[in-house]
Amino acid sequence: MRIISQNGWISIPFEITAFHMTGTFIRMNMAGDTGKGTVMAEYRTPEKAEKAIQLLHEAYIVNENFKKMDAELQLQILGCAEKETQLQYGGIFQFPKEEDL
């Protein structure tokens, strides 16, 4: 699964990354990195940052379940889904903008 920063400038693989909230920031660290982390998203309130993390968790679950489906069923689902949902099924998640939460 690919994770894209809120501003679209960073794209990283989920599998080797750790995400954490610090106040209103969502940061990521690559495996083995012990620094403060790179800011992936910023929100006005901790509750909105929490909501964004929850959306990330949900996208991961959707993608993992989608990968287990038969290829024909995957194509049927993608044909009916909206673009945002297609991206989640395809394994791409971008942290939402403030106004989209």
Image (cartoon, helix red, strand yellow):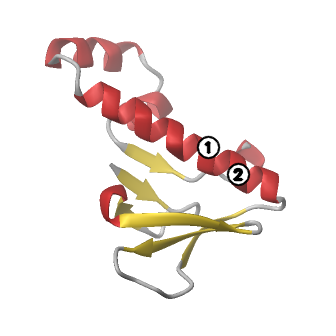
Extreme residue in the bottom direction = 35
The disc placed on residue 54 is 1
Compared to 54, does 41 lie above or below? Answer: below
**Residue 10's spot in the image, x, y percent?**
44, 69
Counting labels gives 2
Q: Quadrant of residue 89?
A: top left
The residues bearing labels 2 and 1 have C-alpha atoms spaced at a distance of 6 Å
Q: Quadrant of residue 36?
A: bottom right
Q: Quadrant of residue 30?
A: bottom left
Extreme residue in the right direction = 45
Answer with left or right where residue 55 lies relative to residue 1. Answer: right
Compared to 48, does 79 lie above or below? Answer: above
Answer with left or right where residue 25 lies relative to residue 20. Answer: right
**Residue 26's spot in the image, x, y percent?**
62, 65
The disc placed on residue 50 is 2
Residue located at (71% from left, 56% from top): 49
Which kind of residue does numbered mark 2 sit on?
Answer: Glu
Which kind of residue does numbered mark 1 sit on?
Answer: Gln
Answer with left or right where residue 3 lies relative to residue 49. Answer: left
The disc placed on residue 82 is none
**Residue 95's spot in the image, x, y percent?**
57, 53
Query: Quick one: label 2, few (<14), some, or many (20+) residues within 10 Å?
Result: some
Compared to 61, does 8 lie above or below? Answer: below
Residue located at (23% from left, 12% from top): 73
- Check contact, mark 2 vs mark 1: CB within 8 A: yes
Answer with left or right where residue 72 lies relative to residue 93. Answer: left
Q: Nearer the viewer, residue 1 or 57?
A: 57
Residue located at (32% from left, 49% from top): 1
* Element on which disc 2 rests: helix
Q: Quadrant of the C terminus?
A: top right
Residue located at (35% from left, 53% from top): 2
